[in-house]
Amino acid sequence: MALLFSLFFSCLAYAEDTVKLSSGTVIEGKIAEQNDAYLKIEVGGLMLKFELKDIEEINGVKLKKEPTDIELNDAGLCVNRGKIYFNQGKYDKALADFSRAVKLNPQLAEAYNLRGLTYVRLQDTDNAAADYDKAIELDPANPYPYLDRGLIYARKGDLDKAMADYNKAISLKPDIPEAYSTRGTLHFYKKELDEASSDYTRALGFNPKSTEALMGRALVYAYKGDLKRAIADYSKVIEIKPDDYLGYLSRASAYEKNEDYSLALPDFKRAAELNPKDPVIFSLRANIYFKMKDYDNAWKDVYKVVGLGSKINQSFLEELKKESGRDQ
């Protein structure tokens, strides 16, 4: 053994490669073979073999610790590895593992639901819906496949089916805040404003800092003409997310409807600072300047809109020309 270590350390001066093990041990020698499973390194005439999972670095480069692509024969293991791939954004690999799980255990509802989620990420909503159907058939007491399928129905414009799925999910598990926010949006698009407001408020009861629910409820208030409450909710959004331009843009629009132009302008300015490439902001602000008879700044915003590759409403442009006494 002493001779072995003597040979090992005597060759360090001539080493070409450095391998650092997860234990912290550093080995220097010449890499003879490397594949996806192991590495062989020659040290003083001896061939040492290490599994890659036990290696931290090779020549100073850290190895990525990823699940291997070996075929698994246990449905539960397939689901677990598929979740890892899904969280890493490797949807093709996740899909393969969830499909393998379904093949190994056709009664595993979780695998169908997870594969449905993966299909959605891959923009395949038809197969996603089919998997949600199967998950619901196998486990009708699980609320989440209803929520996921409901979103697909909503995206396809079938609000009634979407609403039915959300109602079912909430009846199974009444404490999912996101379910109320989304159902509130469904009510809004169905022009059921009171129901929408109620759902957004219930979502906020679970999470008072839900900007999704606050934005939704504020929009309902604005449509109902309750601008004071709309502005209050938009102000809460800005307090929670001060770097999100949508809160400022939305509150500015509410101030405009309330004819509080001097309050709207600072919000439009802040929105423009946060998102200077959105022509909608400058188009709306140009309208504010027009109403305030500040035609020079209105024209400046018109130029910004055009410079961003967008078009100005022609009737507004004609009014601006007329009132400002200039063509451009």
Image (spheres, rainbow, N blue to C red):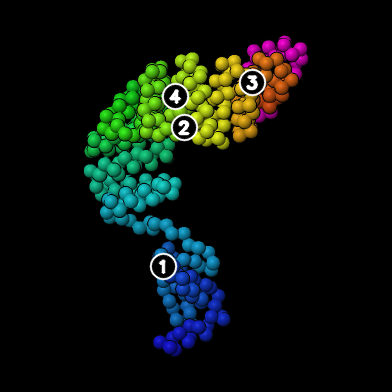
Q: Which residue is mark 2?
A: 211
Residue 87 rendering spot, x and y as whole percentages: 41, 47
- Quick one: label 2, few (<14), some, or many (20+) residues within 10 Å? many
Q: Which residue is mark 1?
A: 54
Q: Is residue 85 above or below residue 325?
A: below
Q: Is residue 60 left or right of residue 276?
A: left
Q: Which residue is mark 4?
A: 217
The span shown in magenta is 306-328
Q: Is residue 313 rendered magenta in the image?
A: yes
| Mark pair 2, 4: CA separation | 10 Å
Mark earlier in primary sequence (1, 2): 1
Q: Secondary structure at mark 4?
A: helix
**Mark number displayed over residue 262:** 3
Residue 51 rendering spot, x and y as whole percentages: 40, 68
The amino acid marked with disc number 4 is Arg
Mark earlier in primary sequence (3, 1): 1
Mark earlier in primary sequence (2, 4): 2
Q: Is residue 222 left or right of residue 135?
A: right
Residue 261 rendering spot, x and y as whole percentages: 62, 19
Q: Is residue 196 left or right of residue 313?
A: left
Residue drawn at point x = 34 percent, y = 34 percent: 176
Q: In this view of the protein, which residue sits in the foreground, 40 or 268? A: 268
Residue drawn at point x = 41 percent, y = 65 percent: 53
